[in-house]
């Protein structure tokens, strides 16, 4: 049963990351690389925990080539054809640690990714991305991806509550995308 929550909700414009005292002498001394071991894929990933979004204006091959130089993941948008992937793979030196393919929640997307991974078995991450991840269908497709790709790191979202986050993790997601809100294409919440 749904319930209406009327308490205050915050977004990124309402939040300040509070600075604290540091023993470092310079910003050059800061190390941003972090090591993660994924729950299901068991992959160990090292890099800067920033992810370039899978929007068609940011999740591009060109963006990946630049971001990967800095140990940052790019979620490549799902609109590239298999031929474009083949051409990209054959004409570039690719650091697969920082490349993530994207998918929606349809069986068409799953089948395309099965074919893409047969052509590019070096791919280590898939981002299953929908605007609002609060459906049983989404949980079921995460389970299907986990069964189909047990060795692949699965990122799933977008959600904002602990309850659905737990369900997606139990369904097989290694990484959860948090945040539902305004974007260039999708607006699910408006400020009043």
Image (cartoon, rainbow, N blue to C red):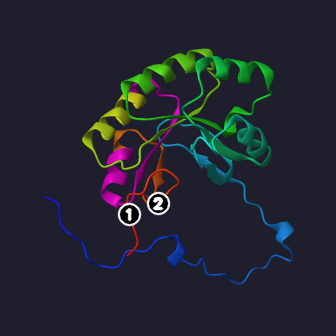
Give the residues drawn in magenta, as a range: 147-169
> If you read the primary sequence from the N terminus, does the residue marked by circle 2 or circle 1 appear first?
2
Across and down, in percent, residue 97 comes to 68, 37
- Please state the horizontal and vertical placement of residue 176, each as a whole percent of the image: 46, 50
Q: Quadrant of residue 82?
A: top right
Quarter of the image where one finds residue 173 = top left
Q: Residue at x 32, y 48 (%)?
A: 167
**SS for callout 1:** loop
Mark 2: which secondary structure? loop
Which residue is more in the foreground, 106 or 122? 106
Instruction: Give the number of marks.
Output: 2
Q: Position of residue 69 (x, y in %)?
A: 80, 44
| 19, 108: nearer the viewer | 108
For image coordinates 65% across by 23% down, the residue present is 85
- Report the residue that reaches farthest toward the left: 1
Q: In this rendered view, identify the residue nearer to me: 125 or 90.
A: 90
User: Residue 157 in magenta?
Assistant: yes
Label 2 sits on residue: 182
Question: What residue is rendered at 60% in x and 31% in y?
Answer: 124
| CB contact under 8 Å: marks 2 and 1 | yes
Quadrant in the picture for the N terminus: bottom left
CA gap, disc 2 to disc 1? 7 Å
Q: Answer with left or right where residue 27 lies relative to residue 98.
A: right
Q: Is residue 111 magenta?
A: no
Give the residue displayed 64% in from the left and 45% down from the top: 58
Q: Which mark is residue 189?
A: 1
181, above or below 121, in the image: below
């Amino acid at each position: 049963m749904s319930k209406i929550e009327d308490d205050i909700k915050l977004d990124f414009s309402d939040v300040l990351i509070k600075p604290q005292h540091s023993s470092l002498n310079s910003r050059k001394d800061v190390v941003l690389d972090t090591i993660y071991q994924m729950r299901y894929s068991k992959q160990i990933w090292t890099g800067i925990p920033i992810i370039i979004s899978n929007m068609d204006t940011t999740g591009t091959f060109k963006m990946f080539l630049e971001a990967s130089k800095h140990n940052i993941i790019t979620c490549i948008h799902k609109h590239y054809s298999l031929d474009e992937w083949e051409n990209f793979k054959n004409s570039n030196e690719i650091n697969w640690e920082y490349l993530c393919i994207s998918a929606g929640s349809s069986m068409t997307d799953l089948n395309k990714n099965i074919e893409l991974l047969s052509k590019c078995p070096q791919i280590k991450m898939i981002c299953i991305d929908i605007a609002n991840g609060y459906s049983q269908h989404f949980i079921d497709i995460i389970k299907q991806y986990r069964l189909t790709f047990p060795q692949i790191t699965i990122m799933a979202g977008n959600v904002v509550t602990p309850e659905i986050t737990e369900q997606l993790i139990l369904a097989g997601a290694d990484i959860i995308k948090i945040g539902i809100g305004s974007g260039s294409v999708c607006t699910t919440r408006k400020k009043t």
